[in-house]
Amino acid sequence: MAVYQVGDRVRIVSEWDNECHQNPEGLMDHWLGATMTIKSWNGVSYQMEEDAGERGENYGWNWFPGAIVGLVAAAENNEELLEEIEYNAGDQVRIVDEFKDMYTWESLGRKGWLGKVMIIDKKIAVHTIGGIKYIYRMFEDSGCWNWESEDIAGIEKESFVQGAYYEPGNRVKVVSEWTTMTKHPNELLEQVVTILERHIDFNAKGARWAYHVKEDFLVGTWHSDDFVGIASPEEDPMNKYHEGDEVRIVSEIDSMCMPDNRMLKWLGKKMTIHAKYSNYFRMKEDQTSHSSGSRWYPFLIRGLESEVRAQEAKEREDKIMELKEKGEYEEVVCSHCGCVLVKGVDEIFTSPNEEPMCEECFETNCFTCEDCGDICWKEEGCQVYDGDDEPFKMICEICKFNGSYAECERCGHLVQEDDYISDGYTTICRTCERRYDYHACYECGSISTEDEMQYYNGDWYCLDCVPDEDSSSSKYVKNYDYKPYPNFLSEQKVPSERNALFMGVELEIDKGERPCACAEELAEIETYDDEFYMKHDGSLEDVGIEIVSHPATLSYHLNRFQWKEVFSTAKKFGYKSHDAGTCGLHVHVSRAYLAADENGATSEEREELNTAKIILFVEKHWDEMVRFSRRDKYQLDRWAKCPDSAITPEDEIGNIKDKLYNLTDDRYQAVNLCNSSTIEFRLFRGTLNLNTFKATLEFVQLLCDYCKEHNLKEVLDSSWDDLISWREYPELATYLKERKMGSVSAE
């Protein structure tokens, strides 16, 4: 349990005790006796504000409770400032050319900034045994490192960043009138808002502080001249309202200022504050069993209900007096309760019988159909429920039968099309589907509860459709996420996957007949399980199968793997791959081989560099790769698009790594880098032609070896013929000759 709270100032012990800290090689010793600020608690240890960056970007040390003496007394915060040069947020400074100790982990991490000009983004006071010192966070490194005065050679330009400086979390008051260049919601004028984040805007005139605020749902950029300053406690409306207060919501507001559309129906209504947070409230009336309600910001509240009613009563009397003086005073009697309404002062509603009604009677007895707009009696209306079993709109009987609605046969609630399941006979809402465990049969689609169904191999079946375990393809065709432990296959003994290129194949087949029988016969091949297995794939039709090999060397694939039997069995049942139009041939190659040198020693830098060379070759010779792949550019753009790495010969390994990382957020690349142990060539079209299949594997081996044995500049300068003539493979030579893709000769 946490003893201290976020933001507490605590004193670190003066000397270490057993197991009271995480202190590898004494890197935390300089914090002994210091005062630090609690940043967070992870259930075991504290994280501090001051040491962020000492254990990697944005990461500090783990401070166990035993490393903390206790809270720092207020009097202890009066230490004197150490004698060092002081800088301020917004200053532009130059970093020293050399750190005092160039070989510490932190110095090595910051080495790239030596001699560079940086902008101070944040200034933090640190209380040490000797006195107060400052650490600085810089804009250019995104605040990842702590910089001290001794790391700074001097100031380049004081107050380089213009404008008032605010911290995230500050409550600031907005100006009463926008400047000519500002485009923010008018509803936020003169309101108090919360700074969400700070950044710097650069332009021809220089730089200025810029902000995002929590209350601006348009996520516009704010500047210092949009604020008056830090709001005083008296100005902050969060101090005006409290839990239990009845408040009136504003009557109208730009919908772009609403956190969500569910709040629109509460405009102009009375609500009760249920809970109060740092910059918003939760209301009692819009809470549900599934939600704590919307966030109600102060600018959405007109005022306390009692104050608003008193103000409205006074305004009503003033308007009535004005009408009487003009001789325009006219009364209308509510047809339901008999109260007197005044035209031009009170809002007069019309009942379904076209008679006048007051607002209270209308809201109690009538509603406006949200589909057609007709006014109806509530007793004749139909309440529509959402997928969470919450009522969200009223419609009339006519719209109920004309619209896409249905009544749940379990609970009787009316739901719209997206919120129910139906097999044509039984209709069940999403809530009952979850609550009572309804499922649709995987085979026939009929809907039943689990006690009337059977779960088989990842799917639910009704009792009439449960597959026969001895004949169903699902016994052999695994789910898409099935992944057994790899079985590395080679003709000759290989010490490890670092010493030879192991390739794993994913071959898709589709549009066949009798998939159950086909899967059974494939599973009867002697090497099934040892060499390959089968999976479902969402990109194929229901009868489609993905045949996946265990990783094997090229010679094993060509000489020992039972590919001939696999292909002939698939063809026997009418399966296609190249001609199916839906199938691919994906080849995975081991990263360990790309990381290893001739002696088998591996390094991450070597792996990144060899991967980069493969990417560059594919990128440079894309037209030839498209021809070789047997796919058209439309198919490749959808499933295996050309990489766009932007790697150059001048790039250092760090830059190459960053550029490769940018390719890992999309697996649909010609060379997919999303897997941790392999890179995947995704661009080849599926095939059941054994010669074409072998030629594809030979090409992958050739490309990986060529890129591994040539440097980055040589790969960039290479031609297509340089690759295909570098080493001769018989099936590949025939394949290239048939397609007139260059002359192939022995090395």
Image (cartoon, grey):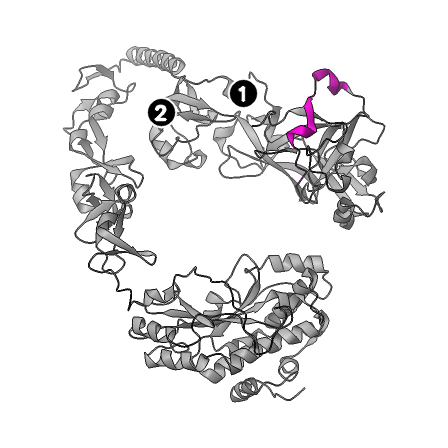
User: Residue 396's x, y, as percent?
Assistant: 19, 37
Of the residues shown, which amino acid type is indicated by label 2?
Gly
Residue assigned mark 2: 268
Left or right of 202? Residue 360 is left
Quarter of the image containing the N terminus? top right
| Label ID, residue 308 | none
Which residue sits at x=67%, y=29%? Answer: 66
User: Residue 742's x, y, as percent?
Assistant: 59, 86
Distance from the alpha carbon under mark 1 to that under mark 2: 22 Å
Task: State whether residue 229 is above or below residue 471.
Answer: above
Quarter of the image containing the C terminus? bottom right
Among the two numbered marks 1 and 2 on one chain, the one whose residue lies closer to the N terminus: 1
Of the residues shown, which amino acid type is indicated by label 1?
Asp
Task: State whether residue 462 is above or below residue 29.
Answer: below
Q: Is residue 646 in view?
A: yes
Q: Secondary structure at mark 1?
A: loop
| Label ID, residue 236 | 1
Task: Give the magenta part as a residue range.
Answer: 59-78
Left or right of 333? Residue 587 is right
Does the stretch in magenta take in 61? yes
Does the stretch in magenta take in 110? no
User: Residue 506's x, y, as percent?
Assistant: 47, 70
Q: Quadrant of residue 399?
A: top left
